[in-house]
Image: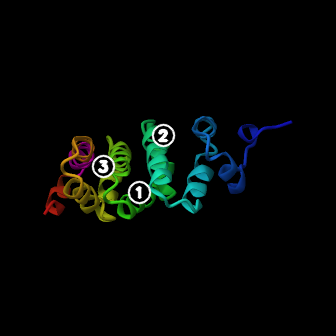
Amino acid sequence: KSTIIEKKAVPATCIKAEISSMASLDQLVAQRSCLDTVIRSIRSFPGTDAAMQEWICNALARWSCDELNRRPIVKNGGFEIIMSAMNRHPTVANVQIQGCRALGNLCYDSEKNSVLLREVGGVSVILHAIHTCQIIEDVFSKACYALTTLLQNDPHGVEYMS
């Protein structure tokens, strides 16, 4: 009996059935060939509550620590997924923390991703996180991380800070 993890092409419905298990998704992502499918499935996942959005941002932040995962995450709408979660839940600190962490990781050491994030409005989303949750140190810290990472690779990003 083959498991979902052993399959080469994983249907979106299978991913949704497994989405409650981070360990299962981590195993799929480790296979690299499944990452595109996992991200597309996350994009279509109907859960918009704050806890689910935090979970998704956390997963993207974890997976984007691996340089080889960044391109497929961005290619399959990772920035949009993260920024949408942050925009939906602007006062939920954990969504903002994980969202900023994920954006920073995706831009880490990547001029292309940094420029793209700026172009799709990422700077204003990060600044909004700082403004809305400014008294929460972890939000401020992760937002500063995301901005610093973006600006290290995209010096023109500073023009969008105001």
Residue at horizontal 56%, vertical 52%?
39
Residue numbers of the magenta segment:
145-154
Q: Which amino acid type corresponds to the residue marked 2 in the rendered image?
A: Trp
Percent coordinates x, y for residue 62 in the rendering: 45, 38
Percent coordinates x, y for residue 112 in the rendering: 34, 52
Residue at horizontal 45%, vertical 58%?
81
* Disc 2 residue crowd, few under 14, some 14–19, many 20+, Cα 10 Å: many
Q: Which amino acid type corresponds to the residue marked 3 in the rendered image?
A: Glu
Q: Is residue 150 magenta?
A: yes
Residue 79 badge: 1
Specify the quadrant of the image occupied by residue 131: bottom left
Nearer-N-terminus badge (1/3):
1
Element assignment for label 2: helix
The residue where tag 2 is placed is: 63
Element assignment for label 3: helix
Q: Which amino acid type corresponds to the residue marked 1 in the rendered image?
A: Phe
The residue where tag 3 is placed is: 111
Residue at horizontal 63%, vertical 37%?
31
Q: Main secondary structure of the magenta part?
A: helix
